[in-house]
Image: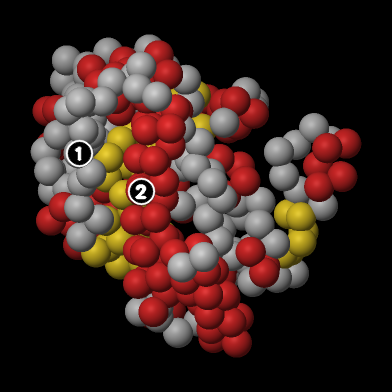
């Protein structure tokens, strides 16, 4: 086997790392009963297959690991990349590159949860339908949840809209209020460049009853280097509760959205070279957009 072929295999170091991680996770989950079919053995098998993509193809770097404590979080990030590869990479990062390891439970849209085979696979590897009762159950059992408050709109962006956040929904914050669960803001840089030229055929998507229909110049994601930034946790104000006014909740959600925008700006400024002819205009656009909103 050539050296080039070997680099795409699971390295002995990563094989050992995964063995250690799942040794810890088996101890953590030994008494846990999951209503959605969460399967730790399947998670380990899938992770071994995906690890070469994580390390070699996307060359993932993680910043801010020190901000993650051993407690449940609602992890909130930008949704990016046309297909939900970002969720997969974030989940791998929290299992492999953060201590103690955890399997993030990813909130997914109903259309994905209902897909044959794929719906079952995502449920067994930790995803759940983004329902309030489901999230509260998981938090009560010490689990951390990954939320993309932009929803499908976050990955339904044309090229000129890359890294421009859609307004956040507020459902995740009401759950955080109910459970007094801290928010962990994160951002992913690099996933947009996997598909550098994209147009969304909205009318075709409506006809097919799909949430989005991206048409891209490339069918396979390009090996864009991925950086995942984890910010300091955001504590839920003691005086607030699920019955707080919409205005107050909206202000706090906007603060989280603005925090992630700042993280995106920082991430773009430190982005590794890849398709710079696309990346640099996009970075300028996002920076200009952010400044315009900050100083109307």
Whole-percent x and y of residue 100?
A: 13, 43
Residue that appears at 12% across and 28% down: 27
User: How far apart, in angstroms, are the residues tagged by discs 1 and 2?
Assistant: 12 Å
Q: Is residue 245 above or below residue 99?
A: above
Residue that appears at 67% across and 69% down: 160
* SS type, badge 2: helix
Q: Tell me, what colour scheme is on the image?
A: secondary structure
Q: Nearer the viewer, residue 17 or 199?
A: 199
- What residue does disc 1 label? 235
Please identify, in this view, whether the residue under mark 1 or under mark 2 is nearer the observer: 2
Quarter of the image with the N terminus is bottom left
Left or right: residue 202 versus residue 170 is right
Whole-percent x and y of residue 104?
A: 32, 37
Q: Nearer the viewer, residue 249 or 140?
A: 249
Whole-percent x and y of residue 66?
A: 13, 56
Q: Nearer the viewer, residue 130 or 178?
A: 178
Whole-percent x and y of residue 91?
A: 35, 45
Q: Is residue 41 above or below residue 185?
A: above
Judge the density around disc 2: few (<14), some (14-19), many (≥20) Cα neighbours within 10 Å. Answer: few
Q: Is residue 100 above or below residue 189?
A: above
Judge the density around disc 1: few (<14), some (14-19), many (≥20) Cα neighbours within 10 Å. Answer: few
* SS type, badge 1: loop
Q: Are marks 1 and 2 in contact (CB under 8 Å)?
A: no
Asked where in the image residue 204 lies, by quadrant, the reply is top right
Residue that appears at 57% across and 31% down: 109
**Picture disc at residue 19:** none
**Picture disc at residue 255:** 2
First in sequence: mark 1 vs mark 2: 1
Residue that appears at 18% across and 43% down: 101
Residue 171 in sight here: yes
Asked where in the image residue 54 lies, by quadrant, the reply is bottom left
Total tally of numbered discs in the picture: 2
């Amino acid at each position: 086997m050539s050296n080039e072929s070997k680099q795409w295999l699971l390295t002995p170091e990563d094989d050992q790392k995964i063995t250690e991680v799942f040794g810890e996770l088996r101890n953590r989950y030994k008494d846990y009963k999951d209503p959605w079919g969460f399967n730790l053995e399947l998670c380990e098998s899938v992770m071994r297959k995906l690890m070469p993509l994580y390390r070699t193809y996307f060359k993932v770097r993680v910043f801010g690991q020190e901000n993650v404590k051993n407690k449940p979080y609602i992890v909130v990030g930008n949704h990016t990349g046309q297909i939900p590869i970002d969720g997969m990479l974030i989940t791998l990062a929290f299992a492999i590159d953060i201590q103690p390891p955890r399997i993030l439970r990813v909130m997914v849209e109903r259309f994905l949860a209902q897909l044959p085979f794929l719906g079952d696979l995502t449920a067994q590897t930790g995803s759940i339908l983004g329902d309030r009762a489901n999230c509260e159950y998981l938090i009560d059992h010490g689990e951390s949840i990954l939320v993309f408050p932009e929803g499908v709109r976050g990955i339904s962006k044309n090229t000129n809209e890359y890294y421009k956040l859609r307004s956040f929904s507020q459902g995740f914050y009401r759950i955080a209020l109910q459970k007094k669960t801290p928010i962990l803001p994160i951002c992913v840089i690099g996933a947009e460049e996997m598909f550098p030229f994209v147009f969304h055929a909205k009318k075709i998507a409506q006809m097919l009853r799909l949430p989005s229909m991206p048409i891209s110049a490339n069918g396979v994601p390009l090996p864009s280097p991925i950086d995942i930034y984890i910010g300091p946790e955001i504590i839920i104000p003691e005086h607030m509760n699920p019955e707080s006014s919409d205005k107050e909740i909206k202000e706090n959600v906007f603060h989280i959205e603005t925090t992630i925008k700042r993280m995106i700006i920082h991430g773009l400024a430190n982005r590794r070279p890849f398709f710079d002819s696309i990346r640099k205009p996009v970075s300028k656009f996002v920076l200009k957009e952010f400044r315009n909103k900050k100083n109307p």
